[in-house]
Structure formats: structure tokens, C-alpha cells
């Protein structure tokens, strides 16, 4: 995981904790109807954010992922691969 990904994961975790605590406080102090409405709005926002992140991730994976082989007799496949063959040619067994 890259440093940037770690920062994003940590930020999401830090935001989710207080949100859960806040919804619990609303449910206990105000009423369940208000907490239900707040949870629906927050859930819709989080769902749309998740959709955006997943679409960004799909686009980024295809466009920015370098493909490199690792050494002798190695194979690296990019986007689509129909057939791969490794090993020495000549049939010496």
C-alpha cells in the first residue's frame, strides 16, 4: 500500500468513528426517527462517494499500471492476453 493510500484509509477510519458515535448519540438523545433520517442521508452520501472511488479506481488501474517483467524467462501481461508461453524452445527434454 502506498503512502497516499494509507493516508486515505486512515482519514476514512477517522471520519467513520465520530460519525457512528454521533448517530448513536442522536438515536439515544433525540429520537429514532431523526437518527433514521440522518443515517439515510449519510448512507446515500457514502454510497455515492464509494461509487466515485470505484469508478476512479477502475479507470486508474487500466491507464496507470505499468507492466514489467521480473527477469530471465519471466512473462508480464498487460491488458488482454490470449496466449502465453514460457521456457526454452527446441524441445530438449
Image (cartoon, rainbow, N blue to C red):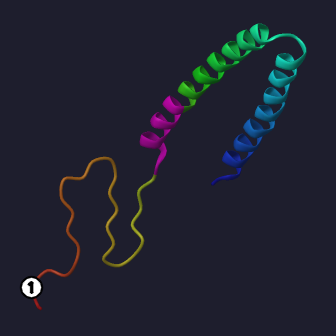
Name the magenta segment's main secondary structure.
Answer: helix
Q: Residue furthest right?
A: 29
What is the secondary structure assignment of the residue under circle 1? loop
Give the residues drawn in magenta, as a range: 54-65
Instruction: Say which residue appears at 57% left-offset and 31% top-offset.
Output: 53
> Residue 92's image quarter?
bottom left
- Give the labeled residue for mark 1: 91
Q: Residue furthest bottom?
A: 93
Toward the viewer: 87 or 8? 8
| Position of residue 71 measured from the top left corner of the image (x, y, whole percent) | 39, 75
Q: Quadrant of the C terminus?
A: bottom left
Instruction: Say which residue appears at 9% left-offset and 85% top-offset.
Output: 91
Q: Is residue 83 above or below residue 75?
A: above
Instruction: Say which residue appears at 90% left-offset and 15% top-offset.
Output: 29
Q: Residues within 10 Å of mark 1 (few under 14, many from 20)?
A: few
Answer whether residue 56 is magenta in the image.
Answer: yes
Left or right: 14 as drawn, with respect to 92: right
Q: Quadrant of the N terminus?
A: bottom right
| Position of residue 41 measured from the top left corner of the image (x, y, whole percent) | 68, 13
Toward the viewer: 88 or 58? 58
Instruction: Say which residue appears at 79% left-offset and 29% top-offset.
Output: 20
| Position of residue 61 measured from the top left corner of the image (x, y, whole percent) | 46, 42
Callout count? 1
> Residue 24's image quarter?
top right
| Position of residue 21 measured from the top left corner of the image (x, y, whole percent) | 84, 29
Amino acid at each position: 500500500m502506498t503512502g497516499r493510500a494509507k493516508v486515505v484509509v486512515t482519514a476514512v477510519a477517522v471520519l467513520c468513528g465520530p460519525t457512528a458515535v454521533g448517530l448513536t448519540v442522536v438515536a439515544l438523545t433525540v429520537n429514532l426517527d431523526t437518527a433514521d433520517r440522518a443515517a439515510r442521508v449519510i448512507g446515500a452520501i457514502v454510497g455515492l462517494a464509494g461509487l466515485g472511488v470505484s469508478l476512479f479506481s477502475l479507470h486508474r488501474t487500466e491507464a496507470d499500471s505499468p507492466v514489467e517483467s521480473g527477469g530471465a524467462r519471466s512473462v508480464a501481461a498487460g491488458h488482454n492476453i490470449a496466449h502465453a508461453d514460457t521456457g526454452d524452445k527446441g524441445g530438449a527434454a
